[in-house]
Amino acid sequence: LCGVYCVDALFMTDATKLIAGTLAALSTMMCLELPQVNLVTKCDLIEEEELESMAEILDADADELTSRLGEQTHPAQKAMNAALASVVDAHSLVRFITLNPDSEESLDAVWMTVNNCIQFGEDAEPRCDFDMGEKEEDD
């Protein structure tokens, strides 16, 4: 069993919305107590520049998130922004995978991540094409 948490790509284009989406995903993960895959959906609907900006925000560390949050929020919220960014960065529990339904590579990456999450095929017996018996020795 695996949870799949979907967030709209249009929602993840700036740091404040990214923090909100990340905390919502983290809350869901903790409440459900299941392995979870977090997807950014509808990546085909946003421009290439916004997609690159979103990728930079998704890969940002706590200091970079704090500076981006400082640009978009009131200065009185600086301590709260730093605390939220450090929670997201310190635990590293939430990572997002982008899903573009027009890209076969994107669909394969999501499929592989979900299979890895549920450990699909881990209990399958290995296949051997060769004889496992003793070797015949030439005298």
Image (cartoon, rainbow, N blue to C red):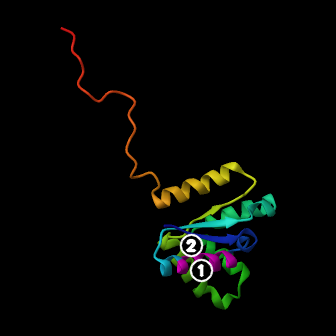
Task: Decide whether the magenta segment is chiefly helix, strand or loop.
Answer: helix
| Image vertical order of residue 83 relative to residue 128, above or below | below
Disc nearer the start of the sequence (1/2):
1
Q: In the image shown, does 103 or 81 lie closer to the viewer?
A: 103
Q: Is residue 139 left or right of residue 26?
A: left
Residue tagged 1: 24
Report which quarter residue 55 is drawn in.
bottom right
Amino acid marked by disc 1: Ala
- Taking the spot 21% from the left edge, 14% from the top edge, the residue there is 137
- Is residue 26 located in the magenta-colored stretch of the structure? yes
What segment is highlighted magenta in the picture? 16-28
- Taking the spot 47% from the left edge, 61% from the top edge, the residue there is 118
- Taking the spot 80% from the left edge, 63% from the top edge, the residue there is 45
- Taking the spot 66% from the left edge, 54% from the top edge, the residue there is 107
Q: Residue furthest bottom?
A: 76
Q: Which mark is residue 62?
A: 2
Q: Residues within 10 Å of mark 2 (few under 14, many from 20)?
A: some
Report which quarter residue 78 is drawn in.
bottom right
Q: Secondary structure at mark 1?
A: helix
Q: Residue furthest top?
A: 139
